[in-house]
Amino acid sequence: MAAQLPEAPEIERHRAAMVRTDISKPVRLAIESAILNEENTFFDYGCGQGGDVQRLLKQGYNSAGWDPHYQPNNPLICADIVNLGYIINVIEDQAERREALLKAWELTQKVLIVAAQVLIDDRNSSQIAYGDGIVTRRNTFQKYYEQEELKAYIDQVLEVDAIPVALGIYFVFRDEAQAESFRASRFHSRITTPRIRLSSKRFEDYQELLAPLMAFITERGRLPYKGELPQESELLLEFGSFRRGFQVILQVTDQAEWDEISDQRRQDILVYLALTQFSHRPKLSNLDHTLKNDIKALFGSYKQACAAADLMLVSVGNSHLIAKCCQQSQIGKILPRALYVHISAIEALNPLLRLYEGCASRTIGRMDGATLVKFHTNLPKISYLFYPHFDKEPHPALHTSMQIDLRDLQVVYRDYDQSPNPPILHRKETFVTPEYPLYEQFAKLTRQEENWGLLDQTSSIGTRQGWQNCLTEHCAELRGHRLYWQKDADPYRVKVLRAARNRRSKRQKSFNTSH
């Protein structure tokens, strides 16, 4: 008698619907990226209990949704922005999963948001393998994708080049020009307008009229073409041309600062164009009007810009050159085998390092909440490190890390959240630029800790317990970003430590004077 096959489990998909207290991350990212705004319609395909739809309606968005279990009678309607949030990972039938993705795309007029669970190596061994995923304890199905696998799946089914915006979250654009504009914007550095250094009666008379021109040149790194500047007619009537108006601006600002802005904008475009080689580089006709004008003004032609980007991409494959860029970086904390940089300082790095990091983030996306980026100098790898309390805590603990091997895009996650002795950070100011809002607060604490001798034993203070032992040994305690003597410390011990601190301070002053 033939052995009876085990009966397939009956999957209860509806139980996978999450009850949230806030807008889901994929939708929030669409709002933050200005993909979703009050002018666009929104449809949530597989909306579960409709949390995102209701919250968006309350905020004034034109929002609707449908769900096969909770809201099956709602109509399926086309919308500018369609959300397929954590749906394809809970459908156990592969043909049905594919159909859901295709149907959501069919309803999409501008941008489809696709989100799915990505693989974290902590799955419980008691879970049941089923199809190409697992059955959870709640009797729901979960397909855990590798991040690169998820992109390949979306691209293959929809015949697109999906854009990663975070782990497991992709935007898919209907219009190629809008897609390229979005890609380019992700490498668009934040730059402040050069400050007014001199006084000029002519500038002061026309300052309000010239302010939009200054803002445009700061944003684009070039003069506007006719029709690009709102309310430009009055300015052109007064000065005859944008160039003449800019000459008045140069009377009170530094030409070198404007040149630096133009150079930064060129670097932004080069990084973007170099990374387009990983999929298919767009034709000039597929770029939006503003980006075309940027390239024309800053490079002369699209051909010249692409040639420069290709040279840059070839250079990024030179591991010795990348290591040299890391070691010579004026930004970030340099250690023998790595350069560590705060996420806010990435755009200020050498363009080759920006491109190197872009090779990882363009395909994989940055880890949720990434605080630091680690450039490995001995291997072609990038790591993202999450310190949830970087600003608030004087020595924040590492929560999660994600390492990407650039040779095969393999991802390794490590979770330190439950560790009793996680790694911690010191000298926080070294990871950021001097423009960072809390830079001076960080630097002041480091100077104090150096003066107390707390940072001398680098091999033992890299973990929470090692650092706590160091503080105890030095009778020190931290309150915020400031050191104090422990209230119950032995008076004689404090006296010895204070004398040692004074000697150290005198030596440092003597060294500074002689140099």
Image: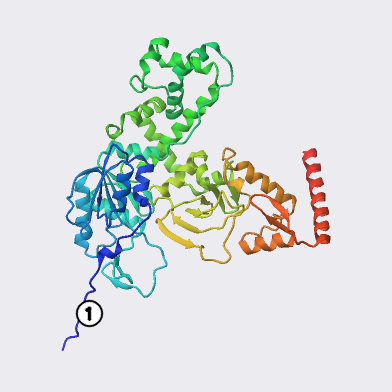
Seen at 37% across and 29% down, the residue is 295
Q: Position of residue 355 (x, y in %)?
A: 45, 43
Q: How many marks?
A: 1
Tell me if residue 71 comes above or below residue 256 in the rendering: below
Please tell me in which quadrant of the rendered image residue 460 appears.
bottom right
Seen at 43% across and 50% down, the residue is 366
Q: What color scheme is it? A: rainbow
| Residue 282 seen | no
The C terminus, quarter of image: top right
Comparing 338 with 319, the one in front is 338
Q: Position of residue 201 (x, y in %)?
A: 54, 11
Q: Which residue in the protein does label 1 denote? A: 6
Q: Secondary structure at mark 1?
A: loop
The N terminus, quarter of image: bottom left
| Residue 99 seen | yes
Comparing 330 with 452, the one in front is 452
Q: Position of residue 28 (x, y in %)?
A: 37, 47
Comparing 156 with 36, the one in front is 36
Q: Is 32 displayed left or right of 40 in the figure?
A: right
Q: Is 212 displayed left or right of 395 in the figure?
A: left
Comparing 50 with 326, the one in front is 50
